[in-house]
Image (tube, rainbow, N blue to C red):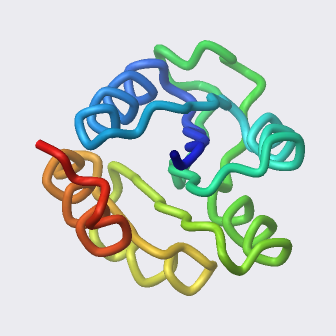
Amino acid sequence: MIKTLISEDMDYWHDIVERNLRFFGFNEFLHAYTIEECLERYKNNKPGLIITDINYDPLMPGNIHNGKGNLDGLRLCEQIREQDRDIKIVVMSSIEECAKETSIKNGADYFIQKKRFKEEIENFIKMHYGWLIEK
């Protein structure tokens, strides 16, 4: 099974991502709430998939690491891509579709707007892991 690292500053989205991936048969998850945590967990665990937020906002209500976050998920994407060409990286964000091009340019394999997460994660899984879908 594919080990998945979810990197997001909001607990709410960790739950949504994990729940949706479990539906498709994913069952091994790591969690990070800052870019620094994500890089550490990536280095120590070598996941096959990373799903990351584009904007780590330490001042957002609900951020459990309030005041300790970082604002550049694209930098995270670049840093991991420099080390690993094979890992799948999905960038998700609440910002508009214009972020898609920038995310792909910075090393992401796929971009998902949070408001369309459920249908877009299914599209990503069909494209990259079609054999995993067991509804």
Report whether 52 appears left or right of 117. Answer: right
For this rendering, which residue is in front, 10 or 40? Answer: 40
Q: Give residue 30's position: percent from left, percent from top.
A: 63, 31
Residue 22 visible? The answer is yes
In which quadrant of the rendered image does the C terminus lie?
top left
The residue depicted at 55 percent of the width and 19 percent of the height is 63
The residue depicted at 67 percent of the width and 65 percent of the height is 77
**Quarter of the image holding residue 21?**
top left
For this rendering, which residue is in front, 46 or 131? Answer: 131
**Quarter of the image holding residue 130?**
bottom left
Report whether 116 appears left or right of 124. Answer: left
- In the rendered image, the vertical position of residue 124 relative to residue 12, given as above or below: below
- In the rendered image, the vertical position of residue 108 relative to residue 43, given as above or below: below
Residue 96 visible? The answer is no
The residue depicted at 62 percent of the width and 29 percent of the height is 31
Q: Give residue 123's position: percent from left, percent from top.
A: 20, 65
Q: Give residue 84's position: percent from left, percent from top.
A: 77, 73
The residue depicted at 82 percent of the width and 47 percent of the height is 39
How many numbered marks appear?
Answer: 0
Q: Give residue 18's position: percent from left, percent from top.
A: 39, 30
